[in-house]
Amino acid sequence: TFATLSIDLRTEGTSFYSLLRNVGSSVGISTGVTFITYMTQYNHAEMAARIDPFNPAIRYNTLPGWDMTSVQGLEMINGEITRQAATIAYLNDFRLMMYLALIGVPLVFLMRARPPDTTTDEMGDTVDEVESAVAAIH
């Protein structure tokens, strides 16, 4: 917390903390979006490579409109491949975020609370300053 900083450095400490938090968020979001985009393209290419006229699901028209002889049929097949590729990419991205979060869990157990500083109060004033202020009032 910022209680460990002297009062004259708390503004700079807060500003620096906010800067690091914003930069970290930006990097994390950018990395996640890049991963989703890459994995969507990769999965689309992998699934589209398995679509051919010899595939029984397409050859026998088991799904209405899914034929390789018309533009509309190819668009329907491509739309389904794109939807499934994006779904797989999002699942992989959330799995990656879960693993990264699990890596951070042991760090919580390494942290410990600092013993309270009995020489200062929550405003950072020493006991002597508080006692002299109380004595001045009385």
Image (spheres, grey):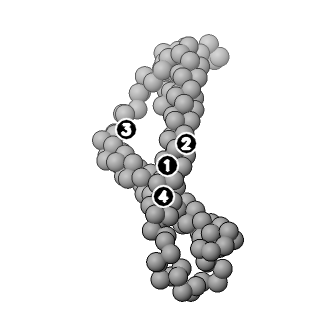
> Are dots 4 and 2 in contact, CB under 8 Å?
no
**Amino acid found under the numbered disc labelled 3:** Ala
User: Can see residue 15?
Assistant: yes
Q: Secondary structure at mark 2?
A: helix
How far is mark 1 from mark 3, CA to CA? 42 Å
Residue at image coords 45%, 68%: 50
Q: Which residue is mark 1?
A: 38
Q: Is residue 84 above or below residue 90?
A: below
Looking at the rendered image, the disc whose residue lies closer to the viewer, 4 or 3, is 4
Left or right: residue 131 versus residue 46 is: right
**Amino acid found under the numbered disc labelled 2:** Ile
Looking at the rendered image, the disc whose residue lies closer to the viewer, 2 or 1, is 1
Q: Which residue is mark 2?
A: 29
Looking at the rendered image, the disc whose residue lies closer to the viewer, 1 or 4, is 4
Q: Secondary structure at mark 1?
A: helix
Closer to the camera, 111 or 104? 104
